[in-house]
Image (cartoon, grey):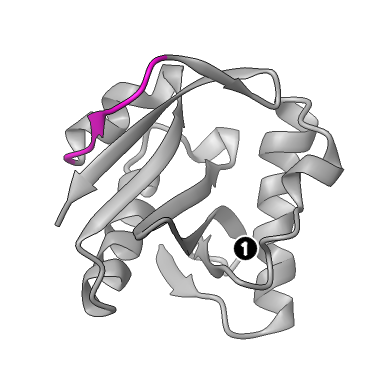
């Protein structure tokens, strides 16, 4: 497994491929909400399996003084195998290397324990984003 920071259009398309499967096909998020106006200002990440196929993705951007982690997703057949943790650790490392000391994300409520195990803490009440329940979580690094 390899987590890379996107540097080419092909790699960005690989990130979109995973995001479309997970968010659009599986979770029924409208494509116009999933691929949004923040794509060009974000730093994107892709996870590749040993056959160089994209299996995970996420993005990072600056918002309100926080490094915001967004669009974390792993293809269904690769979940619960540590790949999400690997992806998150790479993004957190990127944040540290670039001087960010505060991170936040909007976690789908079913994934809260996953993010808590990485050191994030819930900082909001439940709200809905694309029809899915979420809570905001923060981490100081």
Q: Residue at x 39, y 15 (%)?
A: 125
Q: In the image, is 3 to the left or to the right of 129? A: left
The secondary structure type at the circle numbered 1 is: loop
Residue 43 in the image: state x and y as whole percent. Answer: 52, 71
| Residue to which mark 1 is pinned | 53
Q: Nearer the viewer, residue 19 or 54?
A: 19
Q: Residue at x 36, y 38 (%)?
A: 81
Span highlighted in magenta in the image: 119-125
Q: Nearer the viewer, residue 8 or 81?
A: 8
Residue 139 in the image: state x and y as whole percent. Answer: 21, 45
Q: Residue at x 41, y 68 (%)?
A: 2
Q: Residue furthest bottom?
A: 8
Residue 27 in the image: state x and y as whole percent. Answer: 70, 25
Q: Nearer the viewer, residue 5 or 126?
A: 126
Quadrant of the rendered structure where residue 109 is? top left
Q: In the image, is 104 to the left or to the right of 48? A: left
Quadrant of the rendered structure where residue 40 is? bottom right
Pick the quarter of the image with the N terminus: bottom left
Q: Residue furthest front?
A: 64
Q: Residues within 10 Å of mark 1 (few under 14, many from 20)?
A: few
Q: In the image, is 64 to the left or to the right of 139? A: right
Pick the quarter of the image with the C terminus: bottom left
Count of marks placed on residues: 1
Q: Residue at x 51, y 49 (%)?
A: 70
User: Please, is residue 19 above or below residue 124 in the view?
Assistant: below
Q: Would you say residue 124 sits in the magenta stretch?
A: yes
Q: In the image, is 43 to the left or to the right of 36? A: left
Q: Would you say residue 95 sits in the magenta stretch?
A: no
Q: Nearer the viewer, residue 39 or 66?
A: 66
Residue 31 in the image: state x and y as whole percent. Answer: 84, 42
Q: Main secondary structure of the magenta part?
A: loop
């Amino acid at each position: 497994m390899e987590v890379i920071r996107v540097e080419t259009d092909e790699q960005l398309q690989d990130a979109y491929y995973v995001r479309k499967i997970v968010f659009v096909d599986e979770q029924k998020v409208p494509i116009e909400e999933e691929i949004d106006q923040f794509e060009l200002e974000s730093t994107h990440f892709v996870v590749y399996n040993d056959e160089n196929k994209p299996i995970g993705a996420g993005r990072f951007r600056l918002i309100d003084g926080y490094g915001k982690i967004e669009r974390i997703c792993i293809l269904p057949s690769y979940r619960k195998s540590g790949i999400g943790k690997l992806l998150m650790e790479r993004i957190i490392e990127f944040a540290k290397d670039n001087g960010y000391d505060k991170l936040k994300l909007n976690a789908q409520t079913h994934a809260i324990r996953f993010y808590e195990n990485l050191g994030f803490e819930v900082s909001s009440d439940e709200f809905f984003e694309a029809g899915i329940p979420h809570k905001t979580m923060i981490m100081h690094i």
